[in-house]
Image (cartoon, helix red, strand yellow):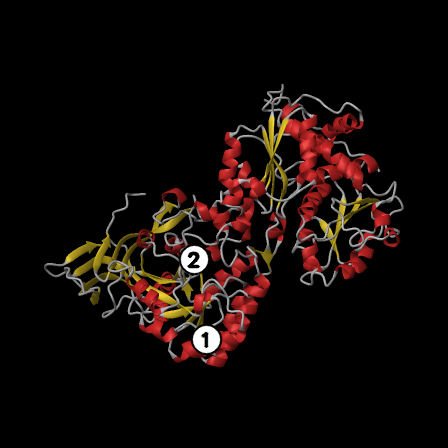
Amino acid sequence: MTAPEYIYPEGRAAFPHDGLVGIAGLAPHEIWFLLDEAQQWVELNRGAQKRRDMLSGLTIINAFFENSTRTLLSFEIAGKRLGADVVNMAVATSSVKKGETLIDTAMTLNAMRADAIVIRHSSSGAVQLIADKVDCPVLNAGDGQHEHPTQALLDALTIRHAKRAFNGLRVTICGDILHSRVARSNILCLTSLGADVRVCAPPALMPADIERMNVTVFHDFDAALAGADVVMMLRLQMERMEGQFIPSPREYRHLYGLSQERLQLAESNALVMHPGPMNRGIEIESNVADMIGRSQITTQVEMGVAMRMACLEVLTRKGRKMEGWA
Amino acid sequence: MSQHAPLTVANGRLVRPDGRIEKGALRAEGGFITAIGPDVCAEPGDTVYDARGLLIAPGLVDLGVFEIDKPAFHFGGITRAALMPDQPTPLDIPSRVRFAAQSGKPDFWVHPLGGATRGLAGESLAEIALMRDAGARAVATGRRWIGDSGTMLRLLQYAGMLGLPVITHAEDAGISGKAVATSGEMATRLGLPSAPAEAEALAIARDVALADLSGARIHLRNVTTRAGLDLVRAAKARGVKITAGVSPAYFMLSDLALANFRTFAHLSPPLRSEEDRKAVIAAIGDGTIDVIASGHDPRGAEDKRLPFADSAPGMAGAETLLPLTMNLVRDGVIPLERAFDLLCANPAKLLGVNAGRLEVGAEADIAVIDADRPWIVDSDKMAASAGNTPFDKQPVQGRVLALFKGGMTIKTKRVSPA
């Protein structure tokens, strides 16, 4: 495969967005620009001295209205490595529990003069709602079943490291597509970059008309795996395995668990990915998750920090009055 | 009856019950129409309103609203509304029904729809006969479908015996669940909880069978899908006592209106596909749909300025009911007189009230309408108690210039020339 050439303009025209609410609305060259920007942070993070002061004096608020460990930590580390003051708003103890509306919470955060706000919320569209009300850049860290753009970007960065090119790349995404914001953002991102995306799930977990998003629909995992270059497994929420969607976890594993035998159906150098946290022994066997050279699961986490550094750095350029961006 | 001078609305074009539109005047005394036709003249002492060649039509009868919002109703030419039982305290006992029935007088009549089941929970029957005698014109299942078929059958048998129509919400709850959108590309892209449109046809299929079995009259408040409309059409052909209604949103909009998570387009049932929208228009044209109603449900920011799935469904529809229906006339879907069957005569007949048509002996609920007058919907300047309309900033045509309830003048505002 040859790498596609994405040329992007100088300055703010390279990424003319005020925030990152979703992959929808991003042009391929804008995605590529963010991936390129992230590269320097991958290298920085691999060194011993991991701190820059580019965002020194800036306040970044992580407002997570839904529980998260790895995404919250990843954003926190990303902000701190760039020198920003990072504040995490824990919803469990916030006034959200006292009935404050989302808009009021957003206005409060805005009045505290944050330079960027990172939001996760359990309702689709909640991040857009806040982004429309605040003055600073808003980054979507996952809204309901809608989008999780930084996850898709870090997945693309991970794939780019191993595969270098997206054109014609066969990517199989398997799991609870219906409830997955990761799947939606990844579909948008990967198809935008030219990949051939397949989605695989039982009918009850497959959203209607998903093929309109330029993907191929599979219910048979073995067929979906044939010739795949990348296999992305999604986490299955335990509460959805109690008979409503899936008869039982072991039945799910029987049909959709990624084992070493199944992985043989994919290309011999196919990457295995998972956004975490994994249900080992259900959607993915331990020996697949830990396969050296094939499993990218820890690389994804590593790329996550770099990708989020790039997003925070790029989106605060206007506020920092960087030349060409202010 | 109130003591006011007889009314003559003169020099207009009368919308007659037989479908004729003829030049003439109308005279009302003691709250009732006493004379109508080309030769009618005002008598000394009458209050006279010059219609200046505009339409003289019956006041609109809005079948199924969620709030009594007089300024919006009067703006829209609505003189009577059937109030849904879904109130902060449900209309499921006679005293609340009686109170609701009085709540609009004298310048607006509220026809309460009794809650079919206690607390609208769909489990045990409410006191339907007592509610009827307290003023309920029909019973309604509310925003919800009655899931238990046995309960629904007994409800239909009982209401049928009492001569009350049953107004139902046609969405199979097992399929619709917590859905806020119709399954399809839009819901998938937005990641909204969605249910297939077939939830409606399933509910209608069952309710048609039960209506047939019980012989009761059934009215489906909103039929919004091709499959649902096909079932209604077939049931009518078989002679089942079934009628169907729809709100303008379902013939004006499809689920594309949900883009950018616009909560003003969050309705119940949810907006459907473009194909279904076209099927609704066809069904209005061929008579499958009997009633167009606003479903007026004003909702403030606290209910609407939320993430889509957390927002309350519903739209403020009273002001746009007439002009959006007039679109169908301009597009040649229905003739002008049929618009008034859908908006006035049919809902009045369904509720068994002596209104909705201009004839001697009927209550003098009269709207003077400039069917062509253009105006622009502005959610910030609505008469309604909240401006949650998905038609914000849309140009429309058709405006009520004068409104009379029981021969009493409600408004004769001269709208400034467009």
Residue B27 position (above or below residue A235): below
Label 1 SS: helix
Which of the 4 image quarters holds residue A252? bottom right
What is the three-letter code of the residue carrying label 1?
Answer: Leu
Q: Is residue B323 left or right of residue B263?
A: left
**Circle 1 is placed at which residue position?**
B155
Residue B328's label in the rendered image is 2
Residue extending farthest left: B44
Residue A212 at x, y = what percent? Answer: 67, 51
Residue B52 position (above or below residue A63): below
Q: Mark 1 — on which chain does it sit?
A: B
Residue B27 position (above or below residue A43): below
Disc 1 to disc 2, C-alpha distance: 35 Å
Residue A127 at x, y = what percent? Answer: 58, 40
**Residue B279 seen:** yes
Q: Quadrant of the N terminus of chain B?
A: bottom left
Label 2 SS: helix
Which of the 4 image quarters holds residue B393? top left
